[in-house]
Every structure is written in C-alpha cells, then in structure tokens.
Amino acid sequence: MKDITLVNTKTSAPSVSLIVSTDNKYPQYILSEKKLTTLLKKVEVDLRKKFTEEQIDLVVSKLKSLILKIDHKQLSKTLAIFASAEKERIIYLPFSVEEKYIIDSSFEVRDLLYSIKKNVDYLVLLIDSHQPQIYFGYNSTLVKLETNNLPSGAEELERDYPSRVSNFSDAVTLKEINLDKYLRNIDSELTALLNEIDTSVIVLGVKKTLGHFKKITKNRKKITNYIEGNHQHSSKEDIYRSIEGIILEKGEDDQQKTIDSIDQAMSSKQCVYGIENVWRAVAEKRGGELIVEKDYMCQAVIGTDKYSLITEGFDSERENIMQDAVDDLIELVIENGGDVSFVNNGKLEDYNKIALLTYY
C-alpha cells in the first residue's frame, strides 16, 4: 500500500500518468523508446487544449526527466510514470495492462492497486541431487534467488563415506543418512528465507527425495504442496507449468473468501452494494473494504450534495463528469483508511458489480 500512498495525494492539475507496456525479449524486458516518445507527444497535444504553457512545461519537463531515470534492469511487463506539479514517480508493474495515458487531477490507482492485490506470492523449492534451487514467485513470474548457503549437491556429502563399507546394506544406509543430511541443509536455508519472506512454499522433487524431505523438514506449516517429478534440467517456464494449477486455484480460493465475506456482512447488515449506495456509504466514511469486479467502470456525476451519485440521465457533455466513478471510489476508500479487493468479472453479478463492507 506504500506505493499507492505516494501517488494518491491530491495534486494540482494537470496530473499525467503514462502506462506503457514493454516487449518481452528474453532474458529481459525492453522498452520501446519510439513508443514512449509517441505517447508523450500525444500527451503534449492534449495538454495544450486545457492548460497554460507554464503548467504544461513543468509537467512535461518532469516526465522527460523521469524517462531518463528508468532503470531498464527493473523493467517488468508494464511501466507506469506519474508526474504532477508536486509529485513524480516511476512504478514497475509485474502484469500487463492496457497501454494508455491519463490526464486528470490525480493518478489512476486502479491498475496499480490491482497489481498489488492480485499478486499471489510464493516460494518454489526445487530439490535436485546435483543443484537445489529456490525461486520467488509472484503470479506467473519466477525469479531465481541467489543464496550462498544451499549445498552445491548431494555428491559433496559422499566424500564423508569411508573408503570401504562392509557390505551393500551398509552402503545403502550411508546414502540414506547423507541424503537426510543434505536435505536438512536445504531445509535450514529455507527456514532462513521464510524468516525474511513470510509466504507459502511449493516443493518439487523425485518421489524418494520428497518422502525423506517430508520427514525432516521444520517448515511443514508453510509448505502447501509437493509435486513429484525430475526438474533437473527444467526451465522457469517448465517449472511454472508444473505449478500453474496450484497458483490459479489459490487465486480462486482467495476470491471466494472475499465473496463469502460479503455474504457474512450482509447477514449482519454491514454491507451495501450497487455504486450509488456504495458512494453514499463511502462519503459518510462508513467504508471498511471495497470489493469490486476488476474491469467495472461507471460514468457519473455527484448530485447536489456530495453523498449522492447520478449514473444516468445527465448531459454527457457537462464538465464535471467523472469518467470512472469507481476509480474515484477507490481513492476515497484508501484516503479514509479502508481497503480494496478485486474479483474477476462476473463474480459480483448478485451485487451489481460492486459492494462495500461497512463499519456500521
């Protein structure tokens, strides 16, 4: 939520947001300078229709300065650049959004907030006899973690074998002992990581290795799934394909819990739904958590008092139209200390696409 607070403060017009998609050129994302330059020229043309040269020069100058500061090593699927008279910010988004620019009185927080709320974070531990690996995952993206304390492979422990063993049974026993020692070293590093990153873990490995690991691990409460298979030579894409069902299911489970919370709040009369009712409750500062379908948008104007919202029957040419009242609602909820959750389109049909859990 920290990033949102930094850009969600009311600012002097104009406020400009550039949201630009990147090109996925393995092994990194690349930003097209031509695409960015074209978008910036369109912004300047539109700014000249509404604002003074002084206002335009200040904001455009900030945008150009920010473009020079882009860290191309941090690029992910989308880049968001925000500038106003008072504030400027670059935000790297690990998800795809519609490419656009927004000229308004404040930053459009929906895309940014959705990227944060949508994220499913997890660790993937790949146990292999040659080289164990740990990945940090968010949604479908896997980033390999470079750790110094993972054992380099089970082979290094075999140096501890005596030069001779009396029989085959003793050799097998020694291999079992050393395998457990190897797995304890891995589990110790996993414990250290989980002290820094509080998230769930998916473990991949061959059947025998997983059987041993289940017995010795001290991180049972954090491990949600074990997946059998040999991933010694698997790419990150192959690894994600192995766990994709788990990640998608977790996202669905999280959404269902959110929807269930609406039903529970309705039974205790601490929920309103439909954008007009939600607007009134938020204006009255009764909003705890806003729950909305991710693509729901609604043109509207505020009524004669700030508590009513008009969504139809108004002149579409009037100046004070909110192009997206949902985005304004999101800002108001955050401004008042509330929270926002998104669900997939169609999940809130019974609630007219938007609901609010209220304090009273």
Image (tube, rainbow, N blue to C red):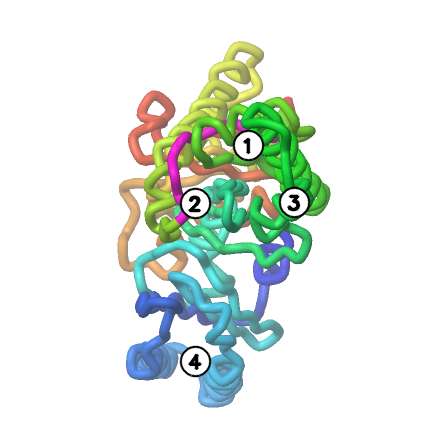
x and y percentages locating residue 193 in the rendered image: 67, 46
Secondary structure at numbered mark 4: loop
Structural distance between the alpha carbons of marks 2 and 1? 33 Å
In front: label 2 or label 1:
2
> Does 2 appear in magenta?
no
Q: CA distance from mark 3 to mark 1?
A: 36 Å
Judging by the rendered image, the residue that carries numbered circle 4 is 51
Question: Which circle marks residue 6 in the picture?
Answer: none
Determine the residue positioned at 47% across, 15% down.
263
Residue at position x 46%, y 36% in the image: 204
Residue 133 pos. (x, y %): 53, 49
What crowding class fits label 3: few (fewer than 14 Cα within 10 Å), some (14-19), or many (20 or more)?
some
Q: CA distance from mark 2 to mark 3?
A: 16 Å
Mark yes or no: residue 221 visible: no
Asked if residue 174 lies left or right of residue 294, the reply is right
Mark 2 and mark 3 lie on one chain; the one further toward the N terminus is 2
Q: Which residues are magenta?
A: 221-232
Residue at x 48%, y 27% (from the top left corner): 208
Circle 4/circle 1 CB separation < 8 Å: no
Task: Identify the amino acid type marked 2.
Answer: Asn
Circle 2 is placed at which residue position? Answer: 139
Q: Which residue corresponds to mark 1? A: 281
Of residues 104 and 349, which is closer to you in this image? 349
State the separation of the CA atoms marked 4 and 1.
34 Å
Q: Label 2's element? A: loop
